[in-house]
Amino acid sequence: MLSEALISLFLLIGGAFALIGSIGLARLPDLFTRLHGPTKATTLGVGGILIASVLHFSGQEHALSLHELLITLFLFATAPVSAYLIARSALHLRGPGGPKDES
């Protein structure tokens, strides 16, 4: 019973972070502030959902589930790199989402 409550808590926390990140992606005004939604909040959201998945499947199989840990490592390694590359390309192109010249 306690494990189901803990799993539910992590699912709710993960879902809330994912929702907040998605709203931030849709509502924030420019590219650089929009990057915070998917890279920060959504990463935490997926992390909470993966923790709930580890607890659920480890409790069913009575062994530690490592698939979720691999997904977490991949997510935490790729999200910052992709955000960095998007920000650098926007700075390089100085397009609609990039900063304006001060000269």
Image: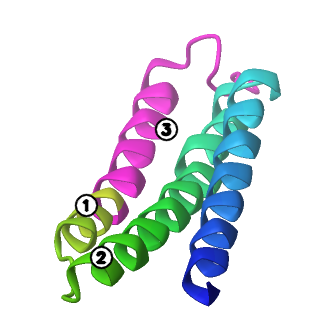
Q: Are marks 1 and 3 in contact (CB under 8 Å)?
A: no
Q: Is residue 32 above or below residue 61?
A: above
Is residue 45 located in the magenta-colored stretch of the structure?
Answer: no
Residue 59 x/y as whole percent = 35, 82
Q: Amino acid at mark 1?
A: Ile
Residue 29 visible in the shown view = no
Colour scheme of this structure image? rainbow
Rate crowding at label 1 as few (under 14), some (14 to 19) or many (20 or more) other CA atoms within 10 Å.
Answer: some
- The residue carrying mark 2 is 60
Q: Which residues are magenta?
A: 76-103
Q: Quadrant of the C terminus?
A: top right
Res. 100 image quadrant: top right
Residue placed most toward the observer, 65 or 19: 65
Spatial separation of the CA atoms under disc 1 and disc 2: 20 Å
Rate crowding at label 3 as few (under 14), some (14 to 19) or many (20 or more) other CA atoms within 10 Å.
Answer: some
Q: How many marks?
A: 3
- The residue carrying mark 3 is 87
Spatial separation of the CA atoms under disc 1 and disc 3: 24 Å
Residue 1 x/y as whole percent = 62, 84
